[in-house]
Every structure is written in structure tokens, then in C-alpha cells.
Amino acid sequence: MTDKNVPEPMADPIVLEDLFRQQGEAFRAMFTPLMPSGLGGAEALPTDPADLQHWAMSAAKLQKMWLDFSAEQAGHIEPVLNRFGDIGKWTQTFMAMAGQMPIAHAETQTKLWNESMALWSAVMGQFIAGAKPDAQVPALPRQDRRFADKRWHEQPAFALLHQTYLLLSERLQQMAAETKGLSPERKEQLRFATKVVTDALSPANFPLTNPVVIERTMETRGENLVKGVEHMLDDLRKGQLTHTDPQAFELGRNIAMTPGKVVFETPMFQLIQYTPTTSEVLEVPLVIFPPWINRFYILDLNPQKSFVRWAVEQGVSVFVVSWKSADASMADVVWDDYVRAQIEAIDHVRERLKVPAVHTIGYCVAGTTLAATLAVLARRGEADKVASTTFFTAQVDFEDAGELKNFVDEGQLKLLSSLATDGFLDGRYMAATFNALRGTDLIWNYVVNNYLLGQDYPAFDLLHWNGDTTNLPTKWHQSYLCDLYRDNRLVIPDAMIVDNTPIDLRRIATPCYIQAGREDHIAPAGSVWKLTRHISGPWRFVLAGSGHIAGVVNPPALGKYQYWLNPGDASSLAEFEAGATEHKGSWWPDWISWLDAQAPARVAAKGKRVPGGRGDRVIEDAPGRYVSMR
């Protein structure tokens, strides 16, 4: 039995050195005959004393950094890069269910052997008997952007290596998809685990099997690895993978810059009202509810990408809720509290501007909650408080909710419970989970570029936001996963009671604009579409190009992506797509036209339409302080 107060032992640097040495010896024995002198032959070994000294200094730096880190971490119990979403966990899942796959069957083995021999013959045929592939794009059977660099194609060792990896990955994932004897849920977990494991085992992710890393290491005499290990140890200290330069952005300076004031706050949220830039505005104001699993400024990244700023420029009185990152004071917060908070924000804006109704937007989990809020208001006879509702990538029916369902089983729920501290879940765990959904892009890409190649981090506002985590109330999170993702109770009329009010989505008659991302891996378009099956009022569905973030944050000025509309009465997403018309660019202009049609009346932008004006007491400037709380 392990004492929880005793830290896990750090890896011995000598052991690590020995592992790398063994991998290097095996790699050289297998592939040196096929490699040119510049990438690993005997001629590539440094012989100049100055070179040898430089290599020795790099090795000494690496050893010292690791020893210092080991000493620094002694006595600390820190979730290093977080267990939830951990690659090792999915490796265990894969190994536990791999016996169901026909890997060891004689027929499978024979087929793999024959395919491998054919592949090797095709690849090696380009490098023997004077045959040479095209100088720019060698004709290899399988293509993958992880291996797009010409050095993967020019050398037979690395061409053979990555092509074999792609073949085996392809076949393993095919076997997982065709495995018999598993429930649909377990089969999906096996498929996901297989993808996670095969992504992790890519030869691009290891220094001795990546020709780009080898060349860079030879050029810098190991300095890239020194810098990369510095990056890695910094990430281990903070328990989170870094995607962008942490010093590049500052709230209110170059992100979340749209002028406005915090006009109201509660222990759960601040309400920001943005300053109008037009002489007239729509009479009905807009209240935006971003998800509390992230920071609100995804909708206000910078002047060029800001949905908030763009909406203000269209003559909309915009309010945005900035949720507080959970702490011990929110240990008892449940879903009812978020529904009450949405109603409180709606009522405050109605009272502040003396209007009977507001437009609303709910993004992701806040959109799911907004559906519940609309159902509560409808049951109470108060549906007229909301003139229209827009849903950004929001699900209410979780039957086909995508890969996140792989993280919702009894084992995962118990793990989540054990990770909670003082009634809240550290946001880094959720960040690790979302990263695992796109491991190639959000994990291994950065392992290669920033750890192995030692590259500097880019200044990228979207990635800065992605890493700006928020904590979640444990009680809310557990019930949300159980009631919605696992049991799908929200679509069962009156199965859930929120704030003493039964929820029946069929009572929602409010006009709805429903946006989904065609490539969304968090809220799949087919799952978002199902919202149209559960409401009774008029709706307009738009299928946007790209995914959960870029499909929403797509300003018209950029001219990117596209969207699809189908005015017909489609009964499924497939039917919608079959009859849809593609439109180039952003869907935002379509949305503002729809919003304007719901309530076209306009009023002068004066009085409390301009926050902080004469006689208007406000709390502070936007973006407020809640967005900075950890």
C-alpha cells in the first residue's frame, strides 16, 4: 500500500540515459546501412575537440536541469501533466481490450506480413538500382502531415519507418472498429484508446526516430534538447502543456479589449455591458452566456476576431456574462445555480434598460443550460422575457455526443471525484481532457516542436485562451456528466427538476438560431442538430465550416471557411446536408439579419445604453476582475 504523503520517485537520469543509449544502438544497428553520413553514419560523429566539448556541455546541462528538478519536486505531490486524459490510462484501456482484436490471429498476421512486404518493396524500390524519388515529393503510398518534411521522404530508413508506422496504425484502428463482442460504448472506448496509443507511438515523437530532430540536434550540438527540456520541466512544474508564449498577451491590452463596463456582479458572475459605437441600437439588447469551462474572451480575442466588437458595430447593445472560476466558496454550486444565474442576468438587463425582453446566446455548456433556462421560464409562464435565442455548438440530446463520452464511465467518474479539492476540480484536468481529443494537434505537435526541436513558443491568442483554464464546481460537474452525458435525462420530459421546476424542452417556443460546426469534435454537428427535434418554436439551423472554436469565431473580414443553409423541412442532418446550399465566408451576417428580423425596432444609444455615463454607477472597466481569477 502506498503512502499518499510520500512523493512518487523521480526518474533516475542514469536510467533515462541508458534507455536512450539502448534505443540509439538499436536504431543504428537497423538503419545505419541505409542512411547517409549526414544523418547517423560514422562520419557524422563529432571528432573535433571543440565539438566534443560542446556536446559534453549540453549533456551536463541536461543532467543538472533534471537533478535540480528532482530535488525541487521532492516532497511535493503535484499532478504532473495531469492524470485525467493521461496517455498511460488509455494505454491500459487499449491493453485490457486488445485481446478482443484479431491481432494474433494467423489470418491477420499473414495479411499484415504480406502488406508489409509489399509496402517495403514499394518504398525501397525508390532507393535501389539507381531509382530515385522526385526531388520535391517522393511518391510514397501513405501521406500524413506529421511526416510532410522532405527528410522523412529522402532517406530510405525514415521513409520505411514512417510508412510502416502508418500501415500498422491504419490496421490497428481498423481492427478496433471491427472488433466483436463489445458493447457500443466499450467499442468506442477501444477505438479511441487505439487512436491515442498509435498517435503517441508515432516515430515523429521520439528524438532518435525523427530525422528532423536528429539533424537539428547535430546542428546545435544538443542545444535544442537543452532548451526543449527547459520547456518540458516548466510544463511539469505547472502541470499543464504550454502552447503559446505565456508573456505575449495581457487582458485588456491585446486581448479582451472591447471597451465596456462591469455593471453588475454576484458571487458567480460579472455582467459586462459594452460601449455602443453607433448612434442607434436595436431596442432589444443581447445577453451572451459563454461556457464557464473556459474564459469568456474567446468571443473577444482581438479587434479583428472579436464577435463582441463586431456585434456592437452592427448596432447591438451587447452584454456578456463573465463567470467566476470555481473555488472553495462554490463547493455547493449545482446546475440549478447556473440556471438561476442566467435568469438573474436576463432580469437585470431588462430592468437596467427598461425593456420587456432580451435576445440571448448560449455557447457550448452555457447553451445547454440556456435550453434548460428557457424550459423553466416557459413552465413558469415567463417565456416572453426572451425574444430569441442563439445556440453556439450546444447539445441537449447526448445520445451521440462524440468522443467526450469516452471519459464518462464509473472509473472516470471515480477518478474525477478523487481529483477534486475543496469542492472544485482544477481546470488543468479538463484542459488535459480536451487536448487528448486532438492529441496529434494539441499534444504531440508541441512535444516535437517545443521539447525535441527546442523551438520558441508562438504568440497565438487562440492558444493563449485555450490554456487559460477555469476551475469547475465538483457537484455541478459530476451531476452534469451523469445526468446528461451518461443518462441523457434532459430530453426526457420532466425527468429533471431545476430550481423546483420540471424541465420539458418541448415547451420552448422561443425563435432559435442553431449553429453547429461541421468538424466539431466536442459537440458533433449531428448531436447539435438534435436540438431541432426537441423544441416547438421556429428555428434556423446553420452548419458552419470548421470546428468548435473556429466554426464560431469566424469574422466576415477574414473571408475564411463557409456555411450551409437549407430552408426546407429536413428531418435529419444528413437530409439537411443533402439539400443545403453552400455560402462562402462567415455566417455572422446571416445571423445578424435573422436577429434584426426578430425585433427590428431601434432606439437612440443614450442613457444607460452607454455604460458609465452620467449618473450610471458601474463597478469597473471591462474585462473585469473575475476573468483573471484563478
Image: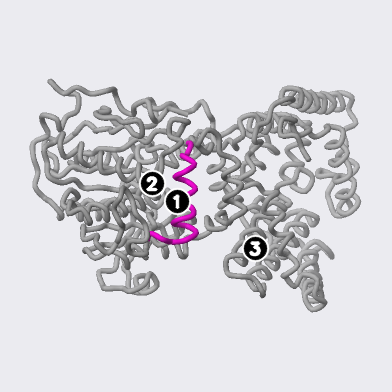
The residue carrying pointer 1 sits among few (fewer than 14), some (14 to 19) or many (20 or more) residues within 10 Å by Cα, namely some
**Image-quadrant location for residue 258:** top left
- Looking at the image, tell me whether mark 3 or mark 1 is earlier in sequence order: 3
Look at the numbered discs 1 and 2 and tell me whether their residues touch, using CB distance below 8 Å: yes
User: Which three-letter amino acid code belongs to the residue tagged 3?
Assistant: Leu
- The residue that disc 1 covers is 480
Q: Is residue 282 left or right of residue 4?
A: left
Work out whether residue 329 or residue 434 is closer to the camera in this orientation and state it. Answer: 329
Position of residue 222 relative to residue 511, above or below, is above
The percent position of residue 210, horizontal first and vertical second, equals: 74, 47
Q: CA distance from mark 3 to mark 2?
A: 31 Å
- Give the extent of the magenta segment: 471-490
- What secondary structure prevails in the magenta region? helix
Q: Nearer the viewer, mark 3 or mark 1?
A: 1
Q: Secondary structure at mark 3?
A: helix
Q: Secondary structure at mark 1?
A: helix
Q: Nearer the viewer, mark 3 or mark 2?
A: 2
- Looking at the image, tell me whether mark 3 or mark 2 is earlier in sequence order: 3
Q: CA distance from mark 3 to mark 1?
A: 24 Å
The percent position of residue 617, horizontal first and vertical second, equals: 19, 22
Residue at 78% x, 36% y is 218
Q: CA distance from mark 1 to mark 2?
A: 7 Å
- The residue that disc 2 covers is 335
- Locate the N terminus by quadrant: top right
The percent position of residue 191, horizontal first and vertical second, equals: 63, 63
User: Which three-letter amino acid code belongs to the residue tagged 2?
Assistant: Trp
Work out whether residue 284 or residue 485 is closer to the camera in this orientation and state it. Answer: 485
Checking the image for residue 190, the label placed there is 3
- The question of residue 421 being in magenta is answered with no
Q: Is residue 553 visible?
A: no
